[in-house]
Amino acid sequence: MSTSKLNTQLLLQSITVLFLIAISIMAFSSLFTASAVTQGEPPCDNPEVTVALEAKNTKFNVTEIKVPKDTCIKIVLVNKDDIEHDITIDPHPDDGFDGINLDVGPLQTNSTTFRTPNKDVTYDFYCEIPGHRGQGMEGKFIVGKGNSSSAPGFEVSLSFIGIMGLAAVTLAMKQRKR
Ligand SMILES: [Cu+2]
């Protein structure tokens, strides 16, 4: 084998190894990002977006709330009924989201603040007073672009590429030693 051919081969091997290392780092950093989100969102003091809702005749006046992700939200619930209502969003620990549970007495107004998860996702919101959800007191709480089926698949495939990359690097190293 001539020297130039050997050099080209070595260069190609080096490029391949660097490329695989880069992909592995990308995949692993995405795993770290995902685990950082599970730490739980801190409460927020300075709402950037206010969402006002009305409860009347055991109905919410909206069935869809759209909010940006990783944003401090103030939610205001105005109760026009002479019975108690609330607005509940279940906790989603995987997203670092603690959920909300805001009670509002008859003909009262109440508010709370919370930070949305840093993720495009859709949750349900509802009134947890027995029977109210069944009467239609529910809706969709859409964060960012809402649920997208491609995002988790992309992360999984990226991790897969990372693992395969590491395997390829290990193989290349072993072959070099021969
Ligand atoms: Cu209710």
Image (cartoon, rainbow, N blue to C red):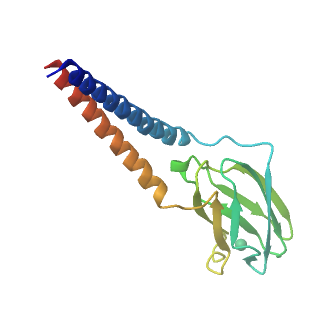
Residue 23: x, y in percent?
40, 37
Q: Quadrant of residue 14?
A: top left
What residue is rendered at 68% in x and 75% in y? 137
Q: Quadrant of the C terminus?
A: top left
What residue is rendered at 72% in x and 65% in y? 86
Residue 21: x, y in percent?
37, 30
What residue is rendered at 66% in x and 47% in y? 70
117 vs 16, left or right, is right
**Relative to residue 170, is residue 48 depicted above or below?**
below
Q: Quadrant of the N terminus?
A: top left
Q: Quadrant of residue 40?
A: top right
Along the viewing direction, whichever of 46 and 108 lies nearer the viewer: 46
Q: Quadrant of ligand 1?
A: bottom right
70 vs 174, left or right, is right
Residue 50: x, y in percent?
80, 57
Q: How many marks?
A: 0
Along the viewing direction, whichever of 140 and 85 lies nearer the viewer: 140
93 vs 78, left or right, is left
**Relative to residue 154, is residue 140 depicted above or below?**
below
Along the viewing direction, whichever of 159 and 12 lies nearer the viewer: 12
Residue 129: x, y in percent?
67, 70
Q: Quadrant of residue 44?
A: top right
**Relative to residue 93, is residue 32 depicted above or below?**
above
What residue is rendered at 71% in x and 48% in y? 71
